[in-house]
Amino acid sequence: MTEKMYRILIAEDDDEQRTALKLILKLSKYVVTEARDGQEAIDNTCRERPDLVLMDLSLPVRDGLEATRELRSQAEFQDLPIIFVTGYDQQETIDSIRACGGTDFISKPIEFDDLKKMIENYIGAGRD
């Protein structure tokens, strides 16, 4: 019996941040897809059907909040875990993330062990 390969989409416009996230997720045996802006995040989610999305708040073209609202407007993505990765952790930002349909958030700089635990909480444990 083969283990399911979970797919994660990283929506992050910062190349270094995206590369670091991609590396740590691939080492944890996830299949990773990337997006550099909010519209690409929507398009890639519709095409690739990831199991989870890591969404930056500040993205070009369409920001993370707008991209999440668009995804949530489609029935097939109502239950898709969308975790915001953001440097903004004020209550107003957290409220905006929840209001647009964000599942959870993690603050930058990212503690990768915390991120892995959060991902496992939403799409299954036992990675490594």
Image (cartoon, rainbow, N blue to C red):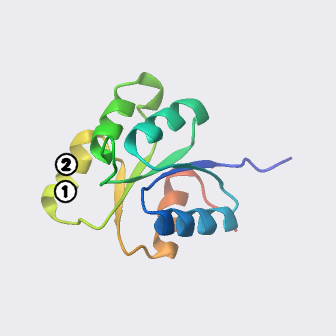
Report if the CB atoms under discs 2 and 1 are less than 8 Å apart.
yes
Amino acid type at circle 2 is: Ser
Which residue is painted at 29% across and 68% down in the image?
A: 87
Q: Is residue 114 above or below residue 93?
A: below
Q: Which residue is mark 2?
A: 96
Mark drawn on residue 52 = none
Amino acid type at circle 1 is: Thr
Which residue is painted at 59% across and 62% down in the image?
A: 22
Q: Secondary structure at mark 2?
A: helix
Query: At which x and y percent is residue 41?
Result: 46, 41
Query: At which x and y percent is residue 62?
Result: 32, 41
Which residue is painted at 33% across and 47% down in the image?
A: 64
Q: Residue furthest top?
A: 75
Q: Which residue is mark 1?
A: 93
Query: At which x and y percent is residue 23?
Result: 62, 67
Q: Secondary structure at mark 1?
A: helix
Q: Residue furthest left?
A: 92
